[in-house]
Amino acid sequence: MLCFNLYAASHAFIRLYTPHLERLDLTYPQFLVLLSLRDQDRQGVGTLGATLAMETNTLSPLLKRMTAAGLVTRVRSQQDERRVVVALTETGRVRAAQAAEVPGCIARDSGMTEESYHQTLKTLQLLRAQIDTAAQQARRGA
Amino acid sequence: MLCFNLYAASHAFIRLYTPHLERLDLTYPQFLVLLSLRDQDRQGVGTLGATLAMETNTLSPLLKRMTAAGLVTRVRSQQDERRVVVALTETGRVRAAQAAEVPGCIARDSGMTEESYHQTLKTLQLLRAQIDTAAQQARRGA
DNA sequence: CCAAAATAAGTCGCGCACGACTTTATCACA
DNA sequence: TGTGATAAAGTCGTGCGCGACTTATTTTGG
């Protein structure tokens, strides 16, 4: 059961993150959004969703909550009135910098070797690529 | 970002399962419950949760829905009135048998080699073990 | 130039996930 | 033997995740 092990490992890993994120008043998906904006500020909702593998119907309410928390701003693009540009506030930038510390902190605590970390990461990236291929074939078949 | 890749791969894999499960009127967690009961019928809620990495506050409503769908029965144990024993109905047993076909079906479609499947599985099981160790250490630290 | 298709974001409903808490039953032991 | 600790299941509230649908804007083909 490959799928179950993915499912269980993913949730377990997020549970490991949770105490650190709670201190920053962040949920795991909100943490991902902050890191993505830290890497590349002023993204559209769709772009954000593409990199984080989230749909707009997940992101829209999430971004609304983050706006309410004063972490990001959402403004309509003037070139294309359909697009909404998400950007970090000053508070958001500071919080993102703090959030960026967490993964290293977890890695240190978990006592994983640099090597097995990268090996596992490579395996997962390959797996994701295979899943995406299979998903596209399934879509073509339907 | 090991954690993000786990998160994304897990959701992507479940999305791959979804069309097959919809035909059986099952969600992914319900599918896991059926397979677990097929392997070992008449389990307590806690036992089920331990093998599937779910809390009782997730399982209780889920099992209620499965009971309403006629897939399982829930009866209080007579030896220990705290325990609730979950068992497959006849419908549930048939559905579980159909559900058991799905993973092989996915594996076939995804075109993964037997070897890379087992290699990935081993990597994930090792990772889960490491996460569990780290989680226990964190709990001790707190 | 304009109607139809495509695109971007959002709303709605339902089912998990899970922290915090409650209820009920069993156990431990002074 | 009673009483506090422990254990099993469940309830409640909040936040995703996502299928189905809506709204508003741009693009495109006739």
Image: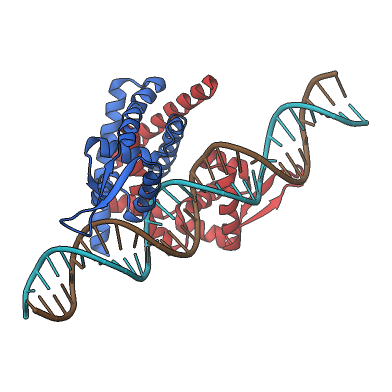
Chain colours: A red, B blue, C cyan, D brown
Viewer-proximal residue among B131 and B49 = B49
**In this rendering, is residue A120 above or below D6?**
above
Asked if residue A72 lies left or right of residue C19, the reply is right
Q: Quadrant of residue D20?
A: top right
Quadrant for the C terminus of chain A in the image: top right
Viewer-proximal residue among A2 and B32 = B32
Q: Position of residue B79 (x, y in %)?
A: 15, 56
Quadrant for the N terminus of chain A in the image: top left
Q: Quadrant of residue A66?
A: bottom right
Whether residue A111 is visible here, answered yes or no, is no
Image point (55%, 58%), residue name: A93
Whether residue B3 is visible here, answered yes or no, is yes
**In this rendering, is residue B88 above or below B134?**
above
Viewer-proximal residue among B97 and B136 = B97
Q: Quadrant of residue D4?
A: bottom left
The number of discs equals 0
**In this rendering, is residue D4 above or below D18?**
below
Q: Position of residue B113 (x, y in %)?
A: 33, 20
Q: Position of residue B21 (x, y in %)?
A: 42, 32
Asked if residue D14 lies left or right of residue A106, the reply is right
